[in-house]
């Protein structure tokens, strides 16, 4: 896994299997948080740019006009492992009380 402090959001593509959506009010709150505090939790993508974790944060950053963000890039992983990682990550966020 490699960390990039300034990864181009344009190089990311949403995972087609990501089930998570948030309503407009929650998206507005997320934008306000990012505006005030910055991005606290980097997004995670695969080597080909598929978003594994951070779909809603990425939406919020794009709405704010941001073009780059901190990012972890994983090496090559199978689609099955991508889906498992996405499910585990979303589950962990929900248990911590992140906005849905």
Image: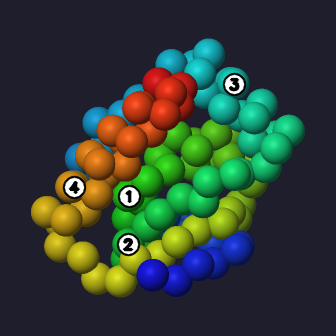
Instruction: Say which residue label 3 marks.
Output: 29
N-term mark: 2 or 1: 2
Instruction: Say which residue label 2 marks.
Output: 46
Asked if the residue under mark 4 is in contact with the one under mark 1, i.e. CB atoms within 8 Å, the reply is: no
* Count of numbered tags: 4
Numbered disc 2: secondary structure: loop
Give the residue at x 58% y 68%.
Answer: 71
Numbered disc 4: secondary structure: helix
Give the residue at x 66% y 32%.
Answer: 30
Give the residue at x 77% y 31%.
Answer: 32
Residue 41, quarter of the rendered image: bottom right
Instruction: Say which residue label 1 marks.
Output: 52
Q: Position of residue 60 (x, y in %)?
A: 64, 40
Regarding residue 37, the answer to whether it shows in the image is yes
Asked if the residue under mark 1 is in contact with the one under mark 2, i.e. CB atoms within 8 Å, the reply is: yes
Give the residue at x 69% y 51%.
Answer: 40
N-term mark: 2 or 4: 2
Seen in the picture, residue 47 relative to 80 is either above or below; the reply is below
């Amino acid at each position: 896994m490699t960390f990039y402090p300034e990864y181009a959001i344009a190089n990311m593509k949403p995972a087609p299997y990501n089930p998570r959506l948030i309503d407009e009010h929650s998206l507005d709150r997320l934008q306000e948080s990012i505006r005030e505090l910055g991005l606290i939790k980097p997004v995670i993508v695969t080597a080909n740019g598929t978003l594994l974790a951070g779909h809603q944060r990425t939406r919020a950053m794009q709405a704010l006009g941001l073009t780059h963000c901190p990012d972890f890039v994983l090496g090559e992983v199978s689609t099955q492992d991508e889906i498992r990682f996405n499910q585990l990550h979303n589950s962990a966020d929900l248990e911590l009380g992140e906005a849905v």
